[in-house]
Image: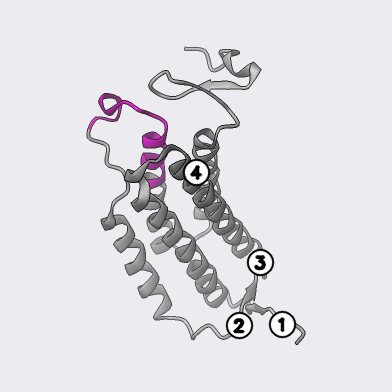
Amino acid sequence: MKIYTKNGDQGYTQLADGTGLHKAESRIQAIGEIDELNCHLGLIACNLPKNIEQSIAEIQKSLFALGAHISSNSPELLGNMKLVSLHDIVYLEEEIDQIESKLSPLKNFILPGGNELIAQTQIARAVCRRAERTLIHWVITEEKEDYQTAIAYLNRLSDYLFIVCRYLHKELNVPEIPWKSGK
């Protein structure tokens, strides 16, 4: 199979089930943004402590499954692959609670940065928020009620990534940069 087909040269692509769509449609944008998020997670996982690296690997699997579901209208193609579930959200919440228990309470908004890994994790958090907004747009536009849990999952994932940033500040001994409103 060739990697290039030239079918997309005019701005169109196909879903996994063969359905043709314009690349500017929100469904395709959601797939792309989830893929982008997964790539950012792969990058930051290269430098994370083992316990968080393992969590990121689980998250990446869930994101791949979410992308596959968005990419197909065919239950036959998806087989028994599960869409993200409440179990996945609970997993993130437990991870957040476990990490947050090691941190001092948040008293200010904090600015992204401090070191490269923390900044990359903040970028992943921001990309996650964008993917969430695009997924919401597709869900509303196409009336896809079965994706409400996926929306909640992305929302919780951005919270998780924020807590990972705070954890990295502590573990790497990099001070958080508080935002001061000037008021």
The disc label shown at residue 34, or none:
4
Which quadrant holds residue 8?
Answer: top right
In which image quadrant can residue 33 be found? top right
> How far apart are labels 1 and 2 at the CA level?
8 Å
Q: Residue at x 44, y 24 (%)?
A: 15
Which residue is at a point 49% across and 37% down the rendered structure image? 31
* Residue linked to disc 1: 180
Classified by dominant secondary structure, the portion drawn in magenta counts as helix
Residue located at (49% from left, 85% from top): 105
- What's the amino acid at mark 4? Ile
Nearest to N terminus: mark 3 or mark 4: 4
Label 3–label 2 contact, CB within 8 A:
no
How far apart marks 1 and 3 lie (CA) works out to 20 Å
What residue is disc 2 on?
108
Drawn side of residue 168 relative to residue 66, left or right: right
Q: Amino acid at mark 3?
A: Asn
Query: Which label sits in the foreground, 1 or 3?
Result: 1
Q: Amino acid at mark 1?
A: Lys
Q: Residues within 10 Å of mark 4 (few under 14, many from 20)?
A: many
Range drawn in magenta: 62-79
Callout 1–callout 2 Cβ contact below 8 Å: yes
Q: For the residue marked with disc 2, what is the amino acid?
A: Asn
Who comes first in sequence, dot 1 or dot 2? 2
